Amino acid sequence: MGESVMESLKAKDYMQTKPITFSAEMMVQAAVEKFLNSHQLGGPVVDSQGHLIGWVSEQDCIAVMLKEAYHCEQVAQVRDVMRKEVLAVGPDTSILDLAEMMMGQKPKIYPVVEEGRLLGVINRHNVMQAIHAQLGTCFVHQARV
């Protein structure tokens, strides 16, 4: 499998184009409901124009959930728990680069952004799908030779 072929596989071709998203004004409880109804462990926080302004994860919500459960009241908005410093990738980021990033201590899911606007998200599962599809092509080609 040549690196040039792997470099040609791009985030935009394998990203999820309709991820769950959150607004900064949303109550944490509403964000938790979105997490519980999806398979995402984290998601982008966007403004009304679709610009990425943060990231929120299940982990970010847990402490607030405990406090809210203890006091039996909703007290926090997503803006209170979201991370404002977000590692994002562009649509032309190669799958190879993403795989290398994901092997380290970096996140396992990234927002895909162009000019500040959210296009989708790409996670480790999507990257594995891309590599698996490429391996399948290699094996078919080798079988024919």
Image (tube, grey):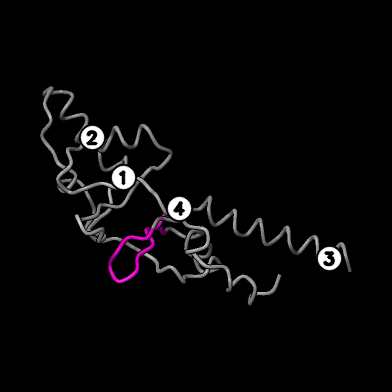
* Mark closer to the observer (3, 1): 3
Numbered badge on residue 30: 2
Q: Secondary structure at mark 2?
A: helix
Instruction: Tell me: 111 left or right of 132.
Output: left
| Secondary structure category for the residue under label 3 | helix
Residue at left offset 54%, top offset 57%? 127
Residue type beneath disc 4: Gln
Label 3 Cα crowd, 10 Å radius (few <14 / some 14-19 / many 20+): few
Q: Residue at x 66, y 56 (%)?
A: 132
Q: Amino acid at mark 3?
A: Gln
Mark 1 surroundings: few (<14), some (14-19) or many (≥20) residues within 10 A: some
Q: Is residue 138 left or right of residue 19?
A: right
Residue marked by disc 4 = 16
Q: Check contact, mark 2 vs mark 3: CB within 8 A.
A: no
Q: Which residue does the numbered mark 3 point to in the structure image?
A: 142
Magenta span covers which residues? Answer: 106-119
Q: How far apart, in angstroms, are the residues tagged by discs 3 and 4?
A: 31 Å
Which callout, 2 or 1, points to the residue nearer the camera?
2
Res 50 quadrant in image = bottom left
Q: Position of residue 126 (x, y in %)?
A: 53, 53
Q: Answer few, some or many: residues within 10 Å of disc 4's Cα (few below 14, many 20 plus, some between 14 and 19).
A: some
Mark-to-mark CA distance, 2 and 4: 22 Å
The disc placed on residue 57 is 1
Which residue does the image show at 88% across and 65% down from the upper left? Answer: 144
Q: Earlier in the sequence, mark 2 or mark 1?
A: 2
**Which residue type does callout 2 highlight?**
Ala
Residue 141 occupies quadrant:
bottom right
